């Protein structure tokens, strides 16, 4: 199985500031993932980014985790998030994992 992570910064690419409350970005993320029909989880991360022009910004990012999602769907989802969150780019990582579900009923 493949685990894909999409890292999306929350600072605007031009103002270099977070323009909206984090909860608003989470709501947008949920809607985008629902529209693509993908199961996901997310976490918040703090980090830094160096823009193509050399400017540096520290920001909060959403890290979206997808398990065994189709690569074309991942790329389209990432492009939408990049545009909706007004980002210069978003980072996608992929890794091979072992995953399984456990069910139990009483």
Image (tube, grey):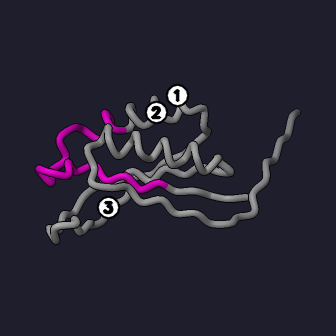
Confirm or deny contact between disc 2 and disc 3 (CB under 8 A): no
Secondary structure, mark 1, is helix
Is 82 magenta? The answer is: no
Q: Does 32 appear above or below 8? A: above
Q: Which residue is mark 3?
A: 46
Q: How many marks?
A: 3
Q: Which residue is mark 2?
A: 32
Residue found at x 31% / y 33%: 24
Secondary structure, mark 2, is helix
Residues 49 and 78: in front is: 78
Does label 1 or label 3 sit earlier along the sequence?
1
Q: Which residue is mark 1?
A: 35
Dominant SS type (magenta) = loop
Q: Does 16 appear above or below 73? A: below
> In the current view of this chain or complex, which residue is farthest to the front?
72
Q: Tell us which disc is closer to us: 2 or 3.
A: 2
Spot occupied by residue 59 in the image (x, y as percentages of width and height): 25, 58
In the image: residue 27, left or right of residue 69: left
Confirm or deny contact between disc 2 and disc 1 (CB under 8 A): yes
The stretch of residues the image draws in magenta is 6-25
In which quarter of the view is residue 58 placed? bottom left
> In the current view of this chain or complex, which residue is farthest to the right?
106
Spot occupied by residue 74 in the image (x, y as percentages of width and height): 54, 47
Disc 2 to disc 3, C-alpha distance: 22 Å
Does label 2 or label 3 sit earlier along the sequence?
2
Confirm or deny contact between disc 1 and disc 3 (CB under 8 A): no
Residue found at x 42% / y 37%: 29
């Amino acid at each position: 199985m493949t685990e894909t992570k999409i890292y999306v910064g929350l600072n605007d690419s031009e103002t270099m500031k977070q323009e909206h409350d984090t909860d608003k970005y989470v709501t947008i993320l949920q809607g985008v993932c629902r529209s693509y029909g993908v199961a996901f989880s997310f976490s918040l991360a703090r980090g830094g980014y160096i823009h193509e022009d050399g400017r540096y910004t520290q920001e909060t990012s959403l890290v979206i985790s997808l398990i065994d999602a189709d690569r074309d769907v991942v790329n389209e989802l990432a492009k939408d998030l990049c545009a909706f969150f007004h980002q210069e780019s978003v980072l996608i990582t992929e890794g091979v994992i072992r995953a399984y579900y456990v069910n139990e009923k009483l």
